[in-house]
Amino acid sequence: MKAHYLAIEAGGTKWLIAIGTTEGKVLEEIEIKTSSPDVLMPQVNRIISEFESKYKNIKGLGIGTFGPIDINPSSPTYGLYLNSTKTAWTGFNVVDYIKKIIGSRYPIYLDTDVNTAVYAEYSLGAGKGKANICYVTVGTGIGGGVIMNGKILKGRLHPEIGHMNVTTSILEPQEHFSVCNFHENCAEGKASGVAMAKRWNASPDEMPSLAWKIEAEYLGQLAMNITAAYSPDCIIFGGGVMQNNSILSLIREAFKVHVNEYWSLPPLDSYIVKSKLENRAGLIGALLLAKQEPSS
């Protein structure tokens, strides 16, 4: 009997619950809007039950979620959301909740959504064939995952690339602008999709060209920080903000200015690249995670 795997991509604006195969092929998926745990998790319960009724021989469940969250399987608080801008989720344990649904019928593997995305890009996407890559998603927030020597980088917690410091752009129209509750000068506070919407009070299609120049300035600085910290073979950008047609070339230009010829790097059109899997990376990575924990 063919094996099936469940996958959950838990994002800041939506959750995707899917069923698929060992090759990362999604057979069916259901989207629900992100809300508080008491509203959302019963919906997750119902969807998992529906998939279990329809698809047999389920071998595992992979979860890629927003953070910060305890992703250490040996920790007593494994699956617990930590101090977060998503205050309704702080202190909620997603692994414990789902274990109550599925019992011991199949294992649960948990990681951050950006770690599952970087694993998918490494396995099937823009990072395929490279040993050291970084994936950055620029959407509701900014997050990132790193693969070094073929393994997802994990430390005491997980990298919080979105909270790396950036210097305020001279083009910035609002002094001390940030949407981060914790940091005035982090990339997420200044360059996330939420930050752009608040700064310009406009949808992406209505934003002036200056908006994208400022955005690229911050993301170029972020790419420099990533290069200094991890020295990857390439940096992959994904997320909703990257749908703008000009943003990638603007990021490369800003990065080049800030690096100031310090490093010898590959051509920037192969070093700073766009996600090949785009908005599918996190979900496909969670599906791959369900089969086997990628860091093992």
Image (cartoon, rainbow, N blue to C red):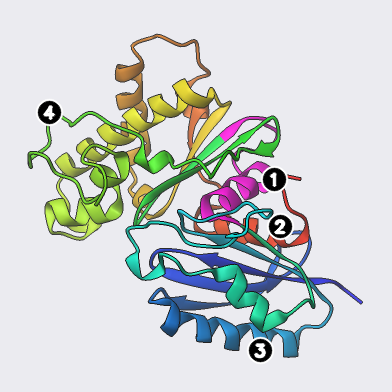
Give the spatial CA distance, label 1 vs label 2: 9 Å
Q: Which residue is drawn at 64% across and 68% down?
A: 7
Q: Mark 1 points at which residue?
A: 123
Amino acid type, callout 2: Leu
Type of amino acid at the residue the image marks with label 1: Ser
Residue 65, x across and y down, in percent? 52, 60
Which residue is at the far right?
1
Secondary structure, mark 1, is: helix
Q: Is residue 137 visible?
A: no
Q: In which quarter of the image is the N terminus?
A: bottom right
- Label 3 vs label 1, nearer the camera: 3
Residue 44: x %, y % from top left? 55, 81
Amino acid type at image mark 3: Glu
Query: Distance from label 4 to label 2 (Cα)?
Result: 43 Å
Specify few, some or many for label 3: CA neighbours under 10 Å numbering under 14, 14-19, or 20 or more: few
The stretch in magenta equals 111-133
**Which residue bears the numbered disc 3?**
50
Choose the circle earlier in sequence order: 4 or 1.
1
Residue picked out by circle 4: 170
Q: Which residue is drawn at 54% across and 65% down?
A: 9
Q: Do the residues labelled 4 and 1 touch (CB within 8 Å)?
A: no
Q: Distance between the residues labelled 3 and 4?
A: 53 Å
CB contact under 8 Å: marks 3 and 2: no
The answer to whether residue 280 is above or below residue 159 is: below
In the rendered image, which residue does mark 2 sit on?
Answer: 288
Mark toward the start of the polypeptide (3 vs 4): 3
